[in-house]
Every structure is written in C-alpha cells, then in structure tokens.
C-alpha cells in the first residue's frame, strides 16, 4: 500500500489536547486553541459535505491552515525546550502537530477522509475482543 493516504484520527488528538490543557489551563492555552481549530475545520467540512460540495474553497482551507499555524506558534512559545534541549510532554505534542501537519489536516483537503477513525475501530473491535477472549 505505497499509494495510501494516511491521516491522524482527530478524536485521539482532541483527547491528547484536552489532557494537556486540563493539566495546566493557564500555561497550555495553545492546546485549547488547537482543539478549537480542529473543531472549526470539522464543522466546515461537514457543512461542505451537507451542501453537496466535493471540496472546501481555497479560502476555507487557507483559514484552517492559518489557525493551525497560529495555535502551533503559540504552543512553541508556551513550551520551549529546557536548558538541555529537552521538550516537556506538551512540547512533544506541539512538535507532533508540526511534524504531521499534512496528515492531521488531510480531512480538510480531502473530504472523503473522515475526521476520526471511529468507523474503522468499531469494525475491528469484535475481532480484538475475540482475540482477547481466545488468549485467556
């Protein structure tokens, strides 16, 4: 599957962002901004699909990317490396968002890509449950 397009499950990312924000609401406001960015983009894609469109406009895509970049910059400001160049847990999450930007925002540029992988996980759950039962 060398031609497969991969995307990150935004439900998992939202959970990670919530955990970071709740641990330090005053010092990790970037996480809330990033979560809001993802949810605004999700709403835009849902509205486009409901309207029968097969893509977001360039302006909508640009807006999502701009919000994303702003939240990312804010995250880097709030989570600089320590004296040894090491990043905190939150700083590592910021860098994950930077490194995997295209995969995270894939649902914005490709409306056939779902926001979450919940459908796939639901399909696998009975198989994993059977494996767990068989192993005991």
Image (cartoon, helix red, strand yellow):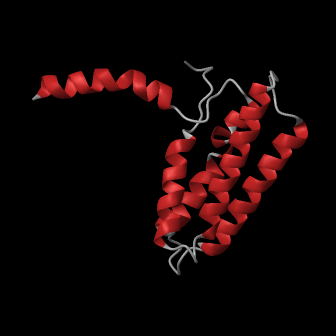
- Frontmost residue, 12 versus 80: 12
Image height check: is 93 above or below 6?
Answer: below
The residue lying at 61 percent from left, 35 percent from top is: 115
Q: How many marks?
A: 0
Pinpoint residue 60: horizontal percent, then vertical percent.
85, 41
Image height check: is 125 above or below 70?
Answer: above
Pinpoint residue 64: horizontal percent, then vertical percent.
78, 47
The residue lying at 51 percent from left, 59 percent from top is: 18
Q: Is residue 134 left or right of residue 29?
A: left
Image height check: is 89 above or below 15?
Answer: below
Q: Residue furthest bottom?
A: 83
Q: Report the quarter where the N terminus lies.
A: top right
Q: Quadrant for residue 94, please give it.
A: bottom right
Q: Report the quarter where the C terminus lies.
A: top left
Pinpoint residue 27: horizontal percent, then vertical percent.
57, 76
Pinpoint residue 32: horizontal percent, then vertical percent.
62, 62
Q: Quadrant for residue 129, please give it.
A: top left
The residue lying at 61 percent from left, 30 percent from top is: 114
- Frontmost residue, 104 versus 121: 121
Q: Is residue 66 left or right of residue 7?
A: right
């Amino acid at each position: 599957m060398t031609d497969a397009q991969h995307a990150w499950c935004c439900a998992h990312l939202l959970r990670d962002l919530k955990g970071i924000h709740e641990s330090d609401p005053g010092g990790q406001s970037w996480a809330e901004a990033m979560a809001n960015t993802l949810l605004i983009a999700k709403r835009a894609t849902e509205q486009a699909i409901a309207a029968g469109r097969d893509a977001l406009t360039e302006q909508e895509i640009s807006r999502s990317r701009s919000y994303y970049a702003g939240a990312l910059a804010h995250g880097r400001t709030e989570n600089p490396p320590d004296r040894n160049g090491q990043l905190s847990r939150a700083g590592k999450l910021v860098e994950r968002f930077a490194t995997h930007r295209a995969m995270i925002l894939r649902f914005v540029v490709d409306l056939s890509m779902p926001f979450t992988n919940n459908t796939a996980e639901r399909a696998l759950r009975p198989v994993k449950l059977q494996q767990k039962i068989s192993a005991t």
